[in-house]
Amino acid sequence: MRPLEDVRIIAIEQYGAGPFGSVHLADLGADVLKIEEPSSGGDVGRYVPPYNSGEDSLFFETFNRNKRSLSLDLGTPEGRKVFEDLVATSDAVYSNLRGDVPAKMRITYDDLKHLNPAIVCCSLTGFGMTGPRSRQPGYDYILQGLAGWMDLTGDPDGPPTKSGLSLVDFCGGYVAALSLMAGLHAARRDGVGGDCDVSLYDTAISMLTYPAAWHLNAGFRPVRTKNSAHPSLVPFQAFEAVDGWFVVGCAKEKFWVRLVEAIGLADLLDDPRFVDFTARGEHKDDLLPLLENRFAENSVDHWVSLLTAAGVPTGPINDVEQALTEEHTVARGLIATTDHEVWGEVRQVTSPVRFGDDPVRYRRAPHRNENFDEVMTMLGYSADEIRGLVDAGAFGKIVQETA
């Protein structure tokens, strides 16, 4: 069995952050059942360009492999009945909505505990379910700005800059998945579930980590650094070679010694300006030009090979294509392949969350409402009951037209 094969999660999720969190659980074997609102066409991620066709997109495939889909109108009494029957037979309700919406939709623990006392209700919202911003929608770019990330990122003379990836969304998804798993453990131990009030804002603020501690305790004010330099360790930054860029990280004194010996600047070891981290930080304007001039004499491959052999932490600054074809990427099995009617063979990156040695089985993302029959059978509904629910609009028009 896969680690989470005995876990069923009802996922009222869409777009990026929520589906990103639950896809790791699905890869671990959890039965993640996506509830898709029928009148709006389901998860908006299905329609994200540029690689989209009808209700299928490569964006959607990325976040929804190994899941199932059910179209369900929670705004109808009959749709609510189906949802509550699912709650009674599931382990968790997982959502990513605006902070005030879970209560309005009645999907919090207090709303559902009478159906299943052990249910875990994990709500990933923009700003959380309490606080002055709880009713505001939260998007990655906005949160990168609010949490100080953009002020920290970019060239010292340039504008505030966002990360090249939606890291608040993705980290928020990880936090939600971790919170849900903690809740499931407690529920199985105690027989009582509860709420996981997780937010993208909380995630972004918490990731300020040591710069926040430095500021809160010593008044430290972070500034942007040239060439992505570490705020306190020198040298630890990007350097330019003849044909590109690479990173050198001297996080320990022994790496500094290995570095200067490997590149032929061992005389710097006797220079009192560079004797330790503190001295190198104080005299970085003297040191860095010496290193930059030396690294400008040869190629990235030359320096990375030389420094790797010397035991100095280093690596090239790859583009996306180079990163995906790195020897280590292939060796670690980080590319998965699924078959799809529209896209043919779909290749995508895998989840880094792992347990045990059994290989992960990958299944393409579900078509909208693809698993209707399976879910109806799972719930034990008779043909007459299903017809009544369909006629009452519990599943939206998509089912009424095809049933």
Image (cartoon, rainbow, N blue to C red):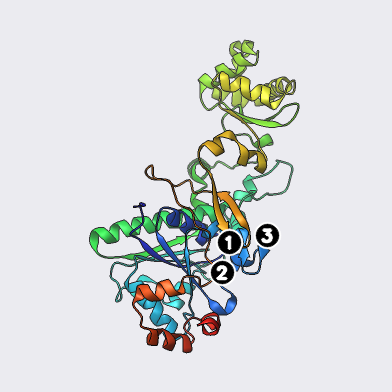
Calculate the distance from the C-alpha at mark 2 to the C-alpha at mark 3. 16 Å
Give me the C-alpha separation between circle 3 and circle 1: 10 Å
Residue 32 x, y percent position in the rendering: 43, 63
Query: Whole-Å distance between the Cαs marked 1 and 2?
Result: 8 Å
Q: Is residue 386 visible?
A: yes
Counting from the top left corner in percent of width and height, residue 162 is at 65, 50
Q: Earlier in the sequence, mark 3 or mark 1?
A: 3
Q: Which mark is residue 51?
A: 3
Q: Which residue is mark 1?
A: 60
Q: Which residue is mark 2?
A: 43
Q: Earlier in the sequence, mark 2 or mark 3?
A: 2
Residue found at the very far left of the displayed protein: 190
Q: Nearer the viewer, mark 2 or mark 3?
A: 3
Looking at the rendered structure, the kind of residue marked 1 is Phe
Q: Are marks 1 and 2 in contact (CB under 8 Å)?
A: yes
113 relative position to 127: left or right: left
